[in-house]
Image (tube, rainbow, N blue to C red):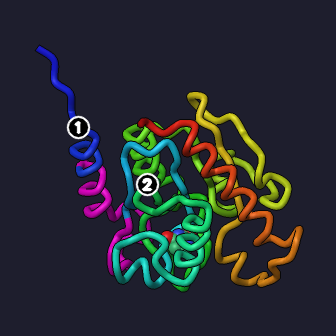
Amino acid sequence: MSFIIRKEVLMDVVVKRIESCFSCPLGPTRINPVPGEGSLDSPVMFVGEGPGEEEDKTGRPFVGKAGRLLTQMMEEVGLSREKVYITNVVKCRPPNNRVPTNQEMLTCSHHLLAQIQIINPKVIVPLGATALNFFLEKKVSITKMRGKEIEWIGGIILFPTFHPSYLLRNRATGPGSPYDLAMQDMKRIKEYYDKYRKI
Ligand code: URA
């Protein structure tokens, strides 16, 4: 006899582990952990840096100012939050929105790696340099690497783009601006989604 464990059941286990996790200094200072949300069948996963204030309050990823911009950019190309999976490298808010330390990212990484195993995406979109550096295990320039396909473990494509917070700090929208480049990336991400989605 064989048993197939549904993805939802496996993800519930990961969420419970995140909820009871105090393995790094971010655990005790959080209001809520932010595991992630979206479709477990999506070929595309967005991975940010770590929860901010709104995310900490609500337990949901990318729901603050940067999240609203990300959602709007997705909708502009015909993607929706429900169609993809959205999460972060670290699942608890770093105090004052500081960048998570390498040790915090490493300690938290088994949660993200478990989520990747369950979802088994074709494309991971690291949002910003911190997430990209986590996946590549070295410091690289997001400006140089965004919009490029990078082959990662298991044939997964990394397709980095700018973090929406960066776009909020750089408000130009003309040709060649960070926003313009990020929208070009978003169009490519939608193409990946259409190419790899399970009907
Ligand atoms: N910034 C992130 O990196 N992640 C969030 O969930 C929100 C803001």
Left or right: 62, with 126 as reference point:
left
Q: Quadrant of the N terminus?
A: top left
Crowding at mark 2 (Cα within 10 Å: few <14, some 14-19, many 20+): some
Residue kind at label 1, given as amino acid type: Arg
Q: Residue 71's spot in the image, x, y percent?
A: 53, 71
Left or right: 61, with 17 as reference point:
right
Q: Residue 92's spot in the image, x, y percent?
A: 42, 70
Outermost residue toward the right? 176
Q: Nearer the viewer, residue 143 or 44?
A: 44
Residue located 63% across and 61% down the image: 127
Residue kind at label 2, given as amino acid type: Lys
From this view, report whether residue 161 is shown above or below residue 53: above
Left or right: 67, with 187 as reference point:
left
Residue 16 shown in magenta: yes
- Real-space CA distance between mark 1 and mark 2, rounded to the nearest whole angstrom: 18 Å
From this view, report whether residue 60 is shown above or below residue 65: above
Q: Residue 49's spot in the image, x, y percent?
A: 57, 65
Outermost residue toward the left? 1
In terms of image quadrants, where is residue 76?
bottom right
Residue located 69% across and 82% down the image: 168
Residue located 69% across and 34% down the image: 151
Q: Residue 177's spot in the image, x, y percent?
A: 85, 72
Q: Nearer the viewer, residue 20 or 71?
A: 71
Crowding at mark 1 (Cα within 10 Å: few <14, some 14-19, many 20+): few
Q: Which residue is mark 1?
A: 6
